[in-house]
Image (cartoon, rainbow, N blue to C red):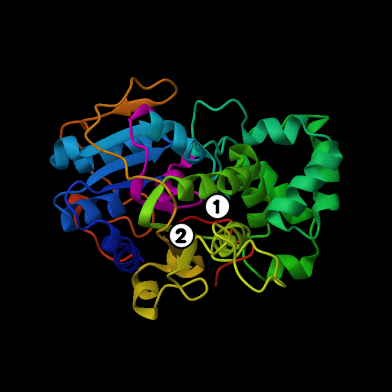
Amino acid sequence: MLRRCTELLSPALREPGAVTVDATLGMGGHAAELLQQHPGLRLVGIDRDPQALELAGRRLAGFGERVTLVHAVHDALPDVLDDLGLRTVDAVFFDLGVSSLQLDEVERGFSYSRDAPLDMRMDPGAPVTAADVLNTYSQGELVRVLREYGEERFAPRIAAAVVRERASEPFTTSARLVDLVRANVPAATRRTGGNPAKRTFQALRIEVNDELRVVERALPAAFERLADDGRLAVLTFHSLEDRIAKNALRRLTESSAPPDLPFVPAGAGPRAQLLTRGGEAAGEDELAVNPRAASARLRAVRRLPGEDRGRQQRDSPGRPVRHHRETRRPPEAGGPRGRSGRTGRGTPGGSAPSTTHGTNDGRTR
């Protein structure tokens, strides 16, 4: 959905000196396209995965000082902008969920289709792995995780089996967990709907990376840093993410005044205009070349002018980064470019092609 994402963001980025934030940079496909389309654009790229930042840095090296890369989780966006001396920005983009880079690296443990260590950390330096969750959470906590984040109907049965099996040997690899899930769901479920472990893997991944709570914090925080007429776009890949994005953006477009008031008091009107009708989905042409986009939904808003807030002067050198690893110049070009990392984030060499919103997709971008 690269083309549609750039269409939605570009009206806010046409003036020289405009600043955009790619809050989930991945392999930098969306970032590269925006930088190519807008020669005067400055881009701040954030990602919690240092491997993705390294590869994106190679891809974006040709844009030089126009690019700043920061190692951080996307709900730290306000701190990142403060560290860079940026009070407001003109656009923010989120491409949520696990990336293709993470899924395709077997040792990261995100995929249920290949045996690997039960890791699932988007940031390899984070303290908790999927194995830690399986081996230390109480049975009740495991049921909660599987139900809430995987919408798993058989959560009690799976959780009980995990607790029983870990007593004899801790869980360390994905194949054993896949076999356990398959053995503890009804035969009819095993015959339909793909791999029965996909909901369990989705739930563990979300818990390990605190994904949903991060999104709940990140979207309102990002909107608050938009300049007047700035744009916020969110690409989601499963229903739990999309529900959060839908509700967060809808609240911004509604009046906060009581419905029975005959007028809307100053400051109580809508703060944003919806730019998408519902969650926009990928078209048939895109799905034919990129099946991973099947679950994608895109939502966007424009910040309405009118708040008593001046636009930030963006020539500030910024302050030293306190909590994030910043790279003002991407690493020099050269070395393997790899695939786009996130679905729709471009192809090798920097070219940028296009890229059933599953309730339990256990998948990637």
- Residue 321 x/y as whole percent: 37, 22
Observer-nearest residue: 257 or 280? 257
Q: Quadrant of the N terminus?
A: bottom left
> Start and end of the magenta stretch?
83-107
Question: How many angstroms separate mark 1 from mark 2 (CA)?
Answer: 25 Å
Dot 2 corresponds to which residue? Answer: 235
Q: Does 103 appear in magenta? A: yes
Residue at the extreme bottom of the image, as rendered: 284
For label 2, count other residues whose C-alpha is less than 10 Å away and answer few (under 14), some (14-19) or many (20+): many
The amino acid type found where label 1 is placed reads Ser
The amino acid type found where label 2 is placed reads Leu
What residue is drawn where x is 39% and y is 80%?
Answer: 284
What residue is drawn where x is 33% and y is 30%?
Answer: 84
Closer mark to the observer between disc 1 and disc 2: 2
Left/right placement of residue 156 relative to residue 198 reads right
Observer-nearest residue: 121 or 222? 222
- Residue 56 x/y as whole percent: 28, 41
Observer-nearest residue: 151 or 183? 151
Q: Quadrant of residue 175?
A: top right
Image: 241 above or below 132: below
Residue 206 in view: yes
Q: Quadrant of the C terminus?
A: bottom left
Left/right placement of residue 106 relative to residue 59 reads right
Dot 1 corresponds to which residue? Answer: 113
Residue 29, label in figure: none
Q: Does 205 appear in magenta? A: no
Image: 178 above or below 324: below
Say what secondary structure mark 2 lies in: strand
Q: Are the two marked residues, 1 and 2, in contact with CB atoms closer than 8 angstroms?
A: no
Observer-nearest residue: 121 or 213? 213
- Residue 67 x/y as whole percent: 23, 39
